[in-house]
Amino acid sequence: MTAEVPHAGGLLDPDGAMDRLAGWKGRLDELAAATDAMSNRIHDLRVTVADGNGLVEVTVDSVGALVDLQLGQRVQRVAPDVVARTIMSTIAAAKRQLADRAQEIIGDTLGTDSPAARAIAERVGQQLRDADPPVDGPDEQHHRW
């Protein structure tokens, strides 16, 4: 009586094991390439936002740092505390827009089905959206000076 050794696809099938390993390696290589592409696109990301009244325009880089601030001519006719609040709220709006774009890039490069991609997108969104304290309202403006 002879025992049969499973061939195609069995645990003891070296060719099948090599095929599975090659498939895993291929998927890992694709994931590494997508992760590099995502990282490069996010690293190069900058967002510019202007407030609705034409007072300020801000640009933030990929980590939400302010890299440019342009003041419009109207700032000369507006109280400094209003200009300051407008700058801060415009920076916050730029960071929200940056978070949205970064999350789009993550979805485009890594997909939305991956738990890892969803976790990365959520973390990026939290870091950029929650980075700054809320801007004080008009009742608080005099207590800060």
Image: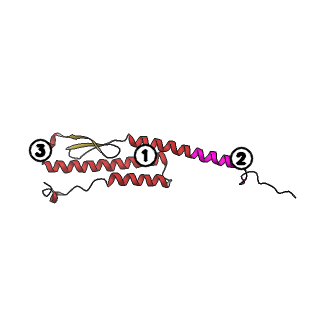
Could you classify mark 1 by the number of other residues whose Cα lies within 10 Å: few (under 14), some (14-19), or many (20 or more)?
A: some
Q: Kindly identify the residue that appears in the image at 41 percent across and 41 percent down.
A: 41
Q: Kindly identify the residue that appears in the image at 63 percent across and 47 percent down.
A: 21
Could you classify mark 3 by the number of other residues whose Cα lies within 10 Å: few (under 14), some (14-19), or many (20 or more)?
A: few
Could you tell me residue 69's position as x and y percent? 23, 41
Give the quarter of the image for residue 57. top left
102 sits left or right of 66 in the view: right
Per the image, label 2 sits on a secondary structure element best described as: helix
Q: Amino acid at mark 3?
A: Arg
Residue beneath label 3, please?
A: 77
In the image as oriented, which residue stretches furthest toward the right? 1
Q: Would residue 55 be counted in the magenta stretch?
A: no
Q: Amino acid at mark 2?
A: Asp
Verify CB contact (< 8 Å) between mark 1 and mark 3. no
Q: Foreground: 130 or 17?
A: 17
Per the image, label 3 sits on a secondary structure element best described as: helix
Residue beneath label 2, please?
A: 15
Q: Going from the N terminus, do you reach mark 1 or mark 3 first?
A: 3
The N terminus is located in which quarter?
bottom right
- Magenta segment: 3-27
The number of numbered discs placed on residues in the rendered structure image is 3
Q: Going from the N terminus, do you reach mark 2 or mark 3 first?
A: 2
67 sits left or right of 71 in the view: right
Task: Look at discs 2 and 3 and give the one toward the viewer.
Answer: 2
Mark pair 2, 3: CA separation: 78 Å
Q: Kindly identify the residue that appears in the image at 41 percent across and 55 percent down.
A: 122
Q: Going from the N terminus, do you reach mark 2 or mark 1 first?
A: 2
Could you classify mark 2 by the number of other residues whose Cα lies within 10 Å: few (under 14), some (14-19), or many (20 or more)?
A: few
Could you tell me residue 89's position as x and y percent? 24, 51
Residue beneath label 1, please?
A: 105
Could you tell me residue 28's position as x and y percent? 55, 46
Mark pair 2, 1: CA separation: 38 Å
